[in-house]
Image (cartoon, coloured by chain):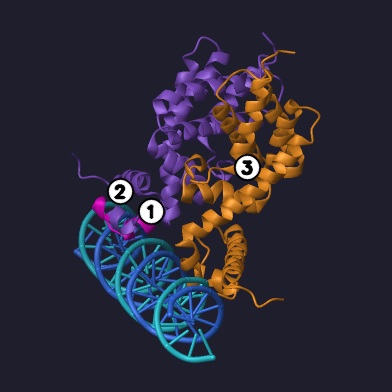
Chain colours: A orange, B purple, C blue, D cyan
DNA sequence: CAATTCGGATACGCGGCGTATGTGAAAAAC
DNA sequence: GTTTTTCACATACGCCGCGTATCCGAATTG
């Protein structure tokens, strides 16, 4: 290993902090996560944190951005694998629902994220998941598959529905059993956007 | 005024605290709201708070319950005023969207509430808004107007869509202008639940 | 009128965040 | 290659806020 430049040392530190933050926020929740514990667990101190991320919120933003990016990439991949664009949208939604069953995603991205950072639409780096869905919807509207509604509005509602489907599923006594019902309901809602009536 | 019995004094105290809590949580957000300030503003001390509500979360739960009950009542009233049950569901949704534009509702019920208290589906006193929508959906399914999907799932997704419509609208630069687009998108989604295709 | 409850006030300790300051090693200056 | 500067991170401090334990006085009970 070459003697590590300063910049890559810092990048490594950031990565360590984000990793530790992800774990702590997911397990304890944002409010209950102690920055002292968190940084110590990563072999660092709060000094590193405030230098790299400004404050506690800054770290949360970084963690959320990372998870969001991963989710968006997965959803996009799954969506593009479908037969056609319409099935792609449905697959994308189903993917969101399944990903949002992950406790880490629920706690950090869906609950604490919006409460602490505000609505995703207001984030500087925009929400990746939302962007992905907007693109998909835009394409479908251009193809005439969907009614010419506001793409951003439609995407936002679809994502919102998917996330609530996941939260509802997770809150049930037997998540695996009710998941299909949630996905089915989501599919029904989505068909409301179709231009053509079968 | 008769010399006030002890129980009604306590009820009055609770009301004062809830009123102060509503204001403080709405303005500062849950995390930034100081219980010292809050209680002092109501002419009391933290002692009264911990005696009546157990802890900070307890007060939030009470505040959220109150707002939720008000919203549910309003939505139910508006929905029942419609021509038929189907239009009632749409009106109910539109009502939710408009109510959720209120900063107090957004901050307290939609953002801090779920983050601090957990998902509404898990609340002991169940979410009133959700219950209202479930009832409406059940009725429509019984009438054969809607597809026989899971009523709870459908209601949950409808509410989720409505709330996200509101958050999206509020996040925009010109809320009044985009509100119609949000409502329109919501209506489209809802039609996906219709059994008959027009 | 004495005894008792109990709603609310007072006082204390602890933990956590943010900031101001220090330090040693890498990078730059020459 | 030595000196100087930078800067990533550590250390140390102060403040605020929550929760709890204890106390007080007025309304209830007999």
In the picture provided, is B184 more to the left or to the right than B194?
Answer: left
Using a 10 Å C-alpha cutoff, classify the residue at mark 2 as few (fewer than 14 neighbours), some (14 to 19) or many (20 or more).
Answer: some
| Res B60 visible | yes
From the viewer's perspective, is the residue at label 1 or at label 3 nearer? Answer: 3
Question: Which of the marked residues, 2 or 1, is nearer the chain's N terminus?
Answer: 2
> Which part of the image, by quadrant, shows the N terminus of chain A?
bottom right
Q: CB atoms at circles 2 and 1 under 8 Å apart?
A: yes
Task: Give the chain letter at badge 2.
Answer: B
Tell which of D8 and B194 is nearer to you: D8
Q: Position of residue A107 (x, y in %)?
A: 59, 52
Mark 1 lies on a secondary structure that is: helix
> Which part of the image, by quadrant, shows the C terminus of chain A?
top right
Mark 3 lies on a secondary structure that is: helix
Q: Position of residue A86 (x, y in %)?
A: 73, 26
Q: Which mark is residue B52?
A: 1
- Residue shown at 61% from the left, 48% from the top: A68
Q: CB atoms at circles 1 and 3 under 8 Å apart?
A: no
Q: Which mark is residue B13?
A: 2
| Res A46 visible | no
Task: Give the chain letter at badge 3.
Answer: A
In the picture provided, is B177 more to the left or to the right than B147?
Answer: left
- Residue shown at 60% from the left, 37% from the top: A131
Asked whether residue A29 is drawn in magenta, I would say no
């Amino acid at each position: 290993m070459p003697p590590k430049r300063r910049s890559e040392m810092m990048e490594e530190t950031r990565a360590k902090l984000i990793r530790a933050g992800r774990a702590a926020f997911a397990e304890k929740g944002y409010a209950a996560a102690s920055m002292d514990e968190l940084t110590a667990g990563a072999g660092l101190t709060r000094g590193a944190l405030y230098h790299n991320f400004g404050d506690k919120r800054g770290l949360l933003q970084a963690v959320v951005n990372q998870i969001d990016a991963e989710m968006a990439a997965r959803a996009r991949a799954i969506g593009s694998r479908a037969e056609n664009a319409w099935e792609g949208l449905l697959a994308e939604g189903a993917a969101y629902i399944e990903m949002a069953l992950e406790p880490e995603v629920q706690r950090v991205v869906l609950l604490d994220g919006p409460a602490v950072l505000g609505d995703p639409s207001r984030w500087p780096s925009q929400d990746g998941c939302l962007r992905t869905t907007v693109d998909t919807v835009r394409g479908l509207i251009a193809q005439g598959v969907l009614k010419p509604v506001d793409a951003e509005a439609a995407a936002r509602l679809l994502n919102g529905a998917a996330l609530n489907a996941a939260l509802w599923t997770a809150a049930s006594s037997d998540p695996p059993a009710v998941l299909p019902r949630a996905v089915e309901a989501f599919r029904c809602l989505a068909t409301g956007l179709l231009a053509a009536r079968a």
